Image: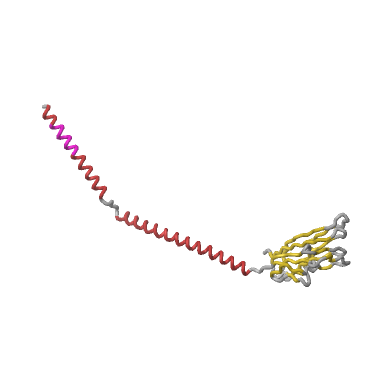
Amino acid sequence: MKTTAFLLLSLCCYSLSGAQEETQKIENENKNQPRNCHPDMCKLIEDFGAMEEKLRTTVEKLRAVEIKLKVTQYQLEELKNKGKTKVIFSAAIGGYGAIGPFNHVTTLIYKTVITNIGSAYNPSTGVFVAPVRGVYHFTFFYHAGGNLRKEIDLFKNEQLIAAAADHASNADTADNGGNAVSLQLEVGDRVYISLSANTYVWDSIGLTTFSGFLLS
């Protein structure tokens, strides 16, 4: 009886072991075989891969176009700046000594030209004439002794715009003053500096100057 039971148990164990080996063999075969999919799904996967590749190519092309566009914009700005009218001038009274006082208003003539890009300033008359419409910035400075009143005025055409002045003082051995202004000018507008009556300025080595340039 015991022998029969042992034989039956051994047979069951052998059968179970064989079944497990067969199952493992089938699983290994399935792993080694290529996966199959539904034809529609396979087509969809292939199409998606192709679209992904096209998208990658398109992105690369767009990046190249963006770089070219930036280069073109830079070149256009360079051309624009080259074509823009440049107006810059700076001049001093020149010489050594006093100008004035006079008993009447006098246009100051800054004869020593330091810079005159655009040739809008006339050193023979002391007058700046706007060559183009735009916003201009002007500065003017003076040097003089303290024993007399000082006043210089900036005019746009016949309109007084700004001034620089100081009262007489025996306590001062010298005075310095100046001012600055930005003006919207039309073509042909005139800007100049006038010395008020009974006042004077002094120049040497560029102490009394008149300058301006086109802002925009």
Q: Residue at x 79, y 69 (%)?
A: 109
- Check if residue 9 falls in the magenta segment: yes
The picture quadrant where one finds residue 195 is: bottom right
Q: Position of residue 192 (x, y in %)?
A: 78, 67
Q: Position of residue 149 (x, y in %)?
A: 86, 60
Q: Residue at x 62, y 66 (%)?
A: 81
Magenta stretch bounds: 7-17
In the rendered view, does 3 fall on the left or right side of 26?
A: left
In the rendered view, does 89 fall on the left or right side of 23?
A: right
Q: Position of residue 185 (x, y in %)?
A: 72, 66
- Along the viewing direction, whichever of 111 and 173 lies nearer the viewer: 173
Q: Residue at x 73, y 71 (%)?
A: 188
The quadrant of the image that shows the N terminus is top left
Q: Residue at x 21, y 40 (%)?
A: 20
In the rendered view, does 136 fall on the left or right side of 7?
A: right
Marker count (numbered)? 0
- Along the viewing direction, whichever of 14 and 208 lies nearer the viewer: 208
The picture quadrant where one finds residue 154 is: bottom right
Q: Position of residue 161 (x, y in %)?
A: 78, 62
- Main secondary-structure element of the magenta-colored stretch: helix
Vertical position of residue 205 compared to residue 31: above or below? below
Which residue extends farthest top? Answer: 1
- Check if residue 171 falls in the magenta segment: no
The quadrant of the image that shows the C terminus is bottom right
